[in-house]
Amino acid sequence: MPSDDPRGFAPGAAGYVPRVNRVGIEEELFVVDDRGHIVPESEAVVRAHRRLGPDEQLDHELFLQQIELQTGPHEDPDGLREDLVAQRSSAVAAARAVGLNAVAVPVDVLGGSEPRPTPDSRYDRMIARYGEIGRNGMTCGMHVHVEVADEDAIHVVDGLRPWTPLLTALSANAPFFHGRDTHHASWRGHLWDMWPTAGPVETFGDLETYRAVVEELIASGAALDEHMLYLDARIAEQFPTVEVRVADACTDVEDALLVAEVTRGLVATLATAPTEAGPWRLETLKAARWRARHDGLGGTLLDPVTRTFVPAEQALDSLVKTIGASLDEAGTHDRVTEGIHRVLTRGNGAARQRAAAGDSLDLAAVMADLIRRTDPHHEEDAS
């Protein structure tokens, strides 16, 4: 992740003391033409980005239909917002410079674009090894990094397990796939779950067990390397962070920032006062993930405090109460409560896509709306 020191979160070198709870975002976008069809033109967009010469960084992803942007780490949520807006704006400008668009959407809405891997030896190995699983991995997510002390990281990873479905519900932004209504709020996660290391896991308990499991997964062939450990939450390979990987790419910048701030609040809370009040069965965690992907904010979600499925508003209220002290400390309590009220009232990304589609299921209109709203300056003008 690019940033001010100099590539983001400083590596965990001897004597390094993490500035706990800084947060950064990785965000994947699709490259689309003027009709909203995904096209394998990331190399042209990245070249245009370099010609424009912005300070922001834009990278290739697994497929030529995708690009990835990264913010630096920030303690100040206003700084994170400014950074994400700059990154988004430069990506949009680079795409437009070559007659294309960069769109924050998790899956191929219209369909018809055959996945084309980016030329890279590692990507070639992934597709050769995992075949159709790899080809179905052409999805765009948002990963949130939160800095934590080394001794707290494993407790955070373990404690996040019942809470991550709420982050999925907040970010759910994939109701349509390949020209069809999936009847889910987020179809991306179901595609992503094809990877053999994806999904909820047992608790690790300590860092030694975590490292042993990583080595076992690589030895089994389920992952080529540590970077392919696609857990819902993992200890980052290169940074002193916990990386939370359950969010869809959010079209609206404010939705992405809300998810990031809630994630920061959860990590800060779990690092100081673990909330897990007993073991969770994997069946329950899987059910909670499915419910979040299916309902988004329009139905029921797991409340990890009461351990029951309740209306989404009630589950989110329980979330805010649980992380309230951490939000107060960061000065973001009002920001989060107002953001949650906004998405409950206006709808999350999936609800907005359905509104754009209308009764006639006009997916061309959906793509036009997604292109428009991905530009953060349009969002600022509309707010």
Image: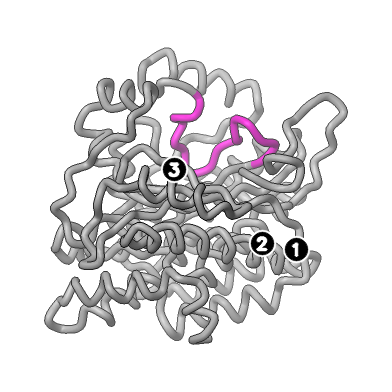
Label placed on residue 281: 3
Q: What is the image's colouring?
A: one colour
156 with respect to 119 (left or right): right
Q: Earlier in the sequence, mark 3 or mark 1?
A: 1
41 with respect to 360 (left or right): right
Q: Give the residue pinned by disc 1.
A: 76
Residue type at mark 3: give it.
Arg
Rendered view: 130 above or below 348: above
Give the mark toward the camera: 3 or 2.
2
Q: Give the residue pinned by disc 2.
A: 80
Look at the image and give the residue range highlighted in magenta: 226-241
The single residue placed furthest to the front in the displayed view is 51
Residue type at mark 1: give it.
Asp
**Near-viewer residue (282 or 32):** 32
Q: Is residue 47 visible?
A: yes
> Residue at position x 75%, y 34% from top?
151
